[in-house]
Amino acid sequence: MLSNVITPMMKILVTRLTILTLLTIGLMPVSGNAQIDDLFNKTVKAITGSSDGEIDLGLKQALEFGVKEAVDKLSADKGYFDSPYKILVPEEARYIVSKVKMVPGFQDVEKQLLDKMNKAAEIAAKKATPIFVDAITALTIKDAMNILMGENDAATRYLETQTRTNLYTAFMPDIQAALDEVNAREYWKSVITAYNNIPFVKKANPALDDHVNKKALDGLFSLIEVKEEKIRTDQSQRTTDLLKNVFSKQD
């Protein structure tokens, strides 16, 4: 029967559409947005058995778990280098690297760059947790409701939308310091100098720190997304009563 395949989340969506429709045609008079939110939240609680506050806490906990797992993995020794998120030489720099390999003393330029870039990202990743936690704490109850009813990556995409620009800005000094810690930017300058001294080549200077920053963030968000999808689709990944209660509503 159809009733057997209608999930609580589907009921919530229908309820939201019904409320909005009744408001539009004037059959449900309310005094303001606060009353609308209260009406909707009471309906959600009746359908799911969870309060809006519990859903908010559950989504925050899922994101906290995802962040912890991503940061722990990628900040470990060779966390980026030995992962699917290994940072490669920038596409616009590959031609430069291919040319510089022919210059004495730069035969292993690509290996050197890979080692240094991934080590820099690994070092910077250790600084990510407080920035992510601040963003998760700021997540509102309304945001949580929309995320719970969204796609399997909805929480991650929300987190990325809210934080990526700020994270990039906050990460850049750490990325640059980390690159300098492994002597990567100085090494890159020598590579660019060697390349620009090759006769008849077009002068170039791709930004190494920008590339490493963007790819480091890509890796973090990708791993957070992996964890979110596991929690949403695999009941064994719901390791707390809160996660079990909140995410069972979408099963």
Image (tube, rainbow, N blue to C red):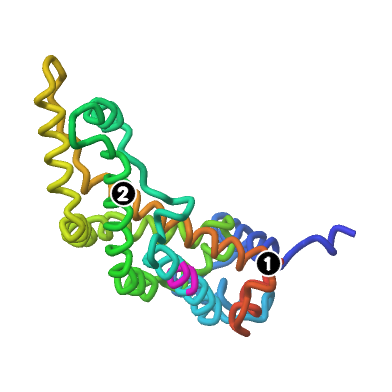
According to the picture, the residue beneath numbered tag 1 turns out to be 234
Count of numbered circles in the view: 2
Towards the viewer: 33 or 5: 5
**240 relative to 235, above or below:** below
Residue type at mark 2?
A: Lys
Q: Residue at the location (67% across, 76% down)?
A: 48
Across and down, in percent, residue 117 comes to 28, 50
Question: Image quadrant of residue 97?
Answer: top left
Residue type at mark 1?
A: Asp
Q: Which mark is residue 19?
A: none
Q: Is residue 234 left or right of residue 134?
A: right
Q: Residue at the location (21% across, 57% down)?
A: 182
Most distant residue in the bottom direction = 241
- Near mark 2 (Cα within 10 A), the count class, few <14, some 14-19 or many ≥20, is some
Which segment did they paint magenta? 65-69
Is label 1 in a helix, a strand or a loop? loop
Q: Which secondary structure type mostly characterizes the magenta part of the structure?
A: helix
Towards the viewer: 21 or 93: 93
Q: Does residue 32 appear in the picture of this structure?
A: no
Question: Are the two marked residues, 1 and 2, in contact with CB atoms closer than 8 angstroms?
Answer: no
Across and down, in percent, residue 195 comes to 15, 28
In reply to whether residue 88 is colored magenta, the answer given is no
According to the picture, the residue beneath numbered tag 2 turns out to be 214
Most distant residue in the top direction = 200
Q: Earlier in the sequence, mark 1 or mark 2?
A: 2
Q: Does residue 62 appear in the picture of this structure?
A: yes
In reply to whether residue 68 is colored magenta, the answer given is yes
Towards the viewer: 166 or 81: 81
**1 relative to 44, above or below:** above
Across and down, in percent, residue 132 comes to 35, 69
